[in-house]
């Protein structure tokens, strides 16, 4: 992930005008270009996405993935010129259909899953952690392919406490999706 040199604060309106196939995130007006994930990341992504998607079949909540613009702090009446933070989570679940529009998601998803890559490790653990906390994401998973662990951060009284850390042999209950459990042996196999 590379921050781009820029002279002014960029807004979502600027991103919408760019005509290319490059994936970007916008954090407090600073643009970051995203690289393509490696095959191991993609394999873990696919397994998690399918498991959650299959569980949600016929339910109100829906699972999505990047590229899909998540405008974490958009308020009613904001225009693209007012928005300076847009992220591209690997996997996320939205349970309120009113948060969806043709441009993506306005507001915090209920669940966000980020799969660490060498280029995103620090960004996902620090920058995005605090963004998701500020936005009110109810559950944030950090999946580490290197250590084969999942750290689950659950929002309680506006804070993420100490994470529950699951190893590759564990089953992880999805707190925001009652009855959904992800078996990690098959995810990390």
Image (cartoon, rainbow, N blue to C red):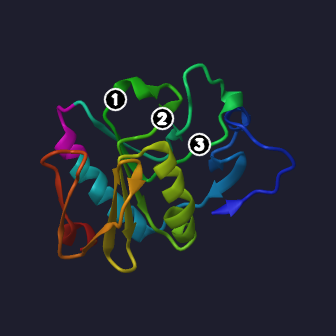
Q: CA distance from mark 2 to mark 3?
A: 10 Å
Q: Residues within 10 Å of mark 2 (few under 14, many from 20)?
A: many
| Marks 1 and 3 in Cβ contact (< 8 Å) | no
Which numbered mark, 2 or 3, is in the foreground of this view?
A: 2
Location of residue 45 in the rendering, given as x and y in whole percent from the top left corner: 36, 59
Give the residue displayed 41% in from the left and 54% down from the top: 159
Dividing the picture into quadrants, the one containing residue 54 is: top left
Q: Quadrant of the C terminus?
A: bottom left
| Residue topped by disc 2 | 107
Mark number for residue 96?
Answer: 1
| Residue topped by disc 3 | 86
Q: In this view, which residue lies farthest toward the top?
A: 77
Q: In this view, which residue lies farthest toward the front?
A: 157
Dividing the picture into quadrants, the one containing residue 59 is: top left
| Marks 2 and 1 in Cβ contact (< 8 Å) | yes
Give the structural element (helix, strand or loop) at label 3. Answer: loop
Dividing the picture into quadrants, the one containing residue 115 is: bottom left
Q: Is residue 1 left or right of residue 55?
A: right
**Is residue 183 a member of the stretch shown in magenta?**
no
Q: Is residue 43 left or right of residue 86?
A: left
Give the structural element (helix, strand or loop) at label 2. Answer: loop
Location of residue 150 in the rendering, given as x and y in whole percent from the top left corner: 32, 68
Q: Earlier in the sequence, mark 1 or mark 3?
A: 3
Q: Earlier in the sequence, mark 2 or mark 3?
A: 3
Give the structural element (helix, strand or loop) at label 1. Answer: loop
The one of 156 and 57 positioned closer to us in this rendering: 156
Location of residue 139 in the rendering, given as x and y in whole percent from the top left corner: 34, 51
Above or below, 102 against 130 in this view is above
Q: In this view, which residue lies farthest toward the left?
A: 179
Mark number for residue 148?
Answer: none
Span colored in magenta:
53-59
Q: Is residue 106 left or right of residue 112?
A: right
């Amino acid at each position: 992930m590379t921050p781009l040199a820029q002279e002014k604060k960029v807004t979502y309106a600027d991103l919408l005008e760019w005509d290319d196939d490059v994936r970007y995130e916008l954090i407090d007006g600073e643009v970051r270009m995203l690289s393509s994930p490696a095959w191991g990341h993609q394999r873990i992504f696919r397994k998690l996405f399918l498991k959650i998607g299959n569980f949600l079949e016929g339910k109100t909540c829906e699972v999505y993935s990047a590229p899909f613009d998540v405008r974490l702090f958009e308020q009613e009446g904001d225009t693209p010129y007012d928005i300076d933070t847009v992220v591209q989570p690997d996997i996320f679940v939205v349970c309120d259909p009113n948060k969806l529009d043709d441009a993506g998601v306005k507001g915090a998803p209920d669940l966000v899953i980020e799969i660490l890559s060498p280029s995103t490790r620090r960004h996902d653990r620090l920058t995005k952690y605090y963004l998701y906390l500020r936005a009110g994401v109810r559950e944030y998973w950090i999946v580490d392919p290197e250590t084969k662990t999942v750290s689950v951060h659950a929002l309680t009284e506006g804070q993420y406490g100490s994470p529950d850390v699951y190893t590759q042999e564990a089953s992880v209950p999805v707190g925001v999706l009652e009855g959904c459990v992800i078996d990690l042996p098959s995810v990390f196999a």
